[in-house]
Image (cartoon, rainbow, N blue to C red):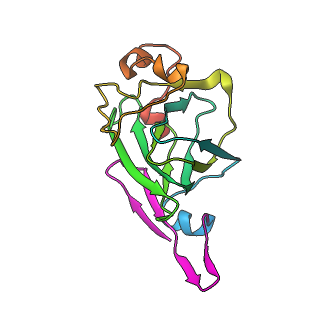
């Protein structure tokens, strides 16, 4: 596996080695040993799988609060997405900065997003499937989101969304979230 840290410390692009022949191909999508060697130490507890029917569906920017915050490892197993991670840890030198990566069924790239980051993606094709691992269980009482078009963050989405959930349409900005007492992402505690 090739593991490359992005401009955001702690966020990695993971490119599996793919072995192909006349029958098709094989790859390791997760190897605890190889990723620990690259500095990614995580114990995944839950696998998730989403389907989006059309191009331009935006999901995000989502996170879970402490004590149920999550690190994630995402890959697109059908179609194409633009995947985004945003550092939302108070006091972080990268606070409100983002990185985006195109993940496709063809390029087989994966994105590792550590705890303390918000996450979202937009579908770049129809019939998209995304699979991801999380190191903590989903907890609805800890679920949160931030506006996908928050000007403080300034994500440059490659296309305009055509469909968002009501929850994502009405999400507050990062500044509005950070003003809430329950928004408990402290950089010193999470680095």
Residue 186 appears in which quarter of the rendering?
top left
Q: Residue farthest to the bottom?
A: 22
Q: Is residue 177 above or below residue 15?
A: above
Residue 160 appears in which quarter of the rendering?
top left
Q: Position of residue 135 (x, y in %)?
A: 64, 45
Q: Is residue 65 left or right of residue 94?
A: right
Depth check, front residue: 135 or 164:
164
Q: Is residue 170 above or below residue 131?
A: above
Q: Residue at x 56, y 46 (%)?
A: 72
Q: Position of residue 96 (x, y in %)?
A: 34, 32
Q: Which residues are magenta?
A: 1-30
Q: The C terminus is located in which quarter?
A: top left
Numbered-mark total: 0
Depth check, front residue: 19 or 165:
165
Q: Residue at x 54, y 25 (%)?
A: 165
Depth check, front residue: 83 or 56:
56
Q: Residue at x 50, y 25 (%)?
A: 145
Q: Position of residue 75 (x, y in %)?
A: 54, 54
Q: Is residue 122 left or right of residue 137?
A: left
Any magenta on residue 64?
no
Q: Is residue 124 above or below residue 151?
A: below
Any magenta on residue 22?
yes
Q: Position of residue 176 (x, y in %)?
A: 40, 14
Q: Is residue 99 above or below residue 3?
A: above
Q: Residue at x 39, y 51 (%)?
A: 101
């Amino acid at each position: 596996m090739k593991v490359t840290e992005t401009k955001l410390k702690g966020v990695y692009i993971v490119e599996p080695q793919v072995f192909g022949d006349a029958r098709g191909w094989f790859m390791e999508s997760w190897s605890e040993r190889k990723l620990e060697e690259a500095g990614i130490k995580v114990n995944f507890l839950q696998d998730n799988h989403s389907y989006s029917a059309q191009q331009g569906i935006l999901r995000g920017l989502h996170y879970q609060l402490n004590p149920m915050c999550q690190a994630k490892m995402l890959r697109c197993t059908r179609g194409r997405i633009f995947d985004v991670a945003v550092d939302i840890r108070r006091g972080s030198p990268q606070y409100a900065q983002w990185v985006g990566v195109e993940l496709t069924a063809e390029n087989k790239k994966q994105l590792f997003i550590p705890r303390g980051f918000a996450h979202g993606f937009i579908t770049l094709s129809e019939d998209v499937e995304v699979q991801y691992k999380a190191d903590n269980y989903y907890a609805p009482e800890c679920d949160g989101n931030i506006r996908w078009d928050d000007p403080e963050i300034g994500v440059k989405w490659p296309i305009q969304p055509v469909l968002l959930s009501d929850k994502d349409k009405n999400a507050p900005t990062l500044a509005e979230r950070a003003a809430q007492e329950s928004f408990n992402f402290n950089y010193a505690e999470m680095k």
